[in-house]
Amino acid sequence: MAATRTEKDSLGTKAIPSEAYYGINAVRAVENFPISGLKAHPKFIDAFLQIKKAAALANKLLNMIQADQADAIVQACDEILGGKLRDQFVVDVFQMGPGLRST
């Protein structure tokens, strides 16, 4: 059996694969909304990452976000754009969000 960690939200607890970067909301979305079985196209993920990276850099320049936070976002975007963590985008393409609130 694979190692897991336990996360909790307002619906209860859930075992999450320990190597997962996603959390309980993504797991619930996968379970509750198996719409098409399709995942986001890599080019869509790339475009989303470019937007996130640009937003982090703009907000850093405007002092709306701390430099270390912006740098962490940029680094994460660059790592994924470089091919890492592509398996962490697990939600059905037609859901594209957990659709749940834990708080």
Image: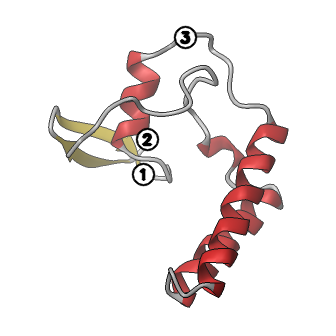
User: Label 3 amino acid?
Assistant: Ile
Q: Position of residue 83 (x, y in %)?
A: 81, 55
Tell me which label, 1 or 3, sits earlier in the chain.
1
Indicate which disc residue 18 carries: 1
Residue 65 against residue 30 in the figure, above or below: below
Quadrant that contains the N terminus: top left
Q: Is residue 78 found left or right of 56 in the rendered image?
A: right
Helix, strand or loop at mark 2 = loop
Name the residue beneath numbered marker 2. 2
User: Label 2 amino acid?
Assistant: Ala
Helix, strand or loop at mark 3 = loop
Tell me which label, 2 or 3, sits earlier in the chain.
2
Q: Quadrant of residue 43?
A: top right
Task: Looking at the picture, tell me which residue is in the foreground, 14 or 95.
Answer: 95
Q: Position of residue 96 (x, y in %)?
A: 56, 31
User: Depth-wise, is mark 1 or mark 3 nearer the camera?
Assistant: 3
Indicate which disc residue 101 carries: none
**Distance in Å between CA atoms under marks 1 and 3:** 25 Å
Residue 1 visible in the picture: no
Helix, strand or loop at mark 1 = loop
Q: Is residue 33 found left or right of 93 in the rendered image?
A: left
Name the residue beneath numbered marker 3. 35
Residue at 71% in and 49% down? 48
Residue at 16% in and 32% down? 11
Residue 68 against residue 46 in the figure, above or below: below
Q: Position of residue 52 (x, y in %)?
A: 66, 60
